[in-house]
Image: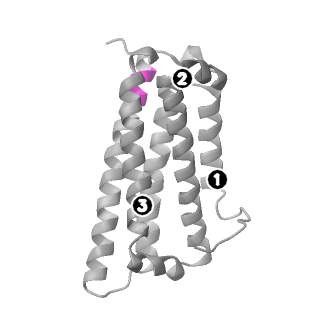
Amino acid sequence: MNVHESDLAQPLLAYALCFYVVVVLWAEIRRANPDFAGLFNILKEEDKRLVLVMRFYRKLTMAFCTIVLCFALYPLIYQNFIPIRQMDIPVLNIAGIIALVASMVWMVIAQVDFDALFYRNALYQQSLNAEEVVKYSKRILAGFQLMFLGITITLGNLLSVGLLALAMIIYHNRDTIKWRSLSA
């Protein structure tokens, strides 16, 4: 099966839209719940950094979705991202697609699990503890990283490689970075 970048424009566009809905919009709907507002306050300082990394990853998701949008609809703009033609190999494209599918499944399961925990605790008037929130946050961040990797492998270009590197650096140095604000 030969899968080249040119065959992936429409499927990647559909994927980016679905991923954006599952990750960004789902989180915004959850944040609109008044019970969710106090969640940030139970976290310790180092755990709050994890939440800020997640917010940064949501912004990176928009950047990766923009890369896909340009690839699918505006190829002249996409050329400015400096595509790496040596990465347009069917095996790499299939590996990238597998990573993207895995990231979508991972994110849906992680979001459903977190919502079940959150709403179950809200229903029984119990508070979440910080360890549970951190555990689910790390699972969601792993899904983000898998998506970033999948897009980078599938649409090899210097911009996506740079964004992936930035995401990994931010994640691994999250405890040493001086964040401007740790408030909700």
In the rendered image, which quarter is residue 84 located in?
top right
Task: Return the residue at label 1.
Answer: 170
Sequence order check, earlier mark of 2 and 1 = 2
The front one of 65 and 156 is 65
Q: Residue 66: image x %, image y %?
A: 54, 36
Residue nearest the observer in this picture, 80 or 171: 80
Residue 157's place in the image compared with 120, above or below, is above
The CA distance from mark 1 to mark 3 is: 21 Å
Dot 2: element: loop
The CA distance from mark 2 to mark 1 is 29 Å
Task: Determine which of the numbered discs, if any, sits on residue 80 in the image.
Answer: none
Pick whichever of labels 2 and 3 is earlier in the sequence.
3
Residue 124 magenta-highlighted: no
Residue 74 marker:
2
* Tag 3 residue: 27
Task: Give the residue displayed 50% in from the left and 82% down from the top.
Answer: 42
User: Which stretch is magenta?
Assistant: 92-96
Foreground mark, 2 or 1, reads 2
Labels 1 and 3: the sequence-earlier one: 3
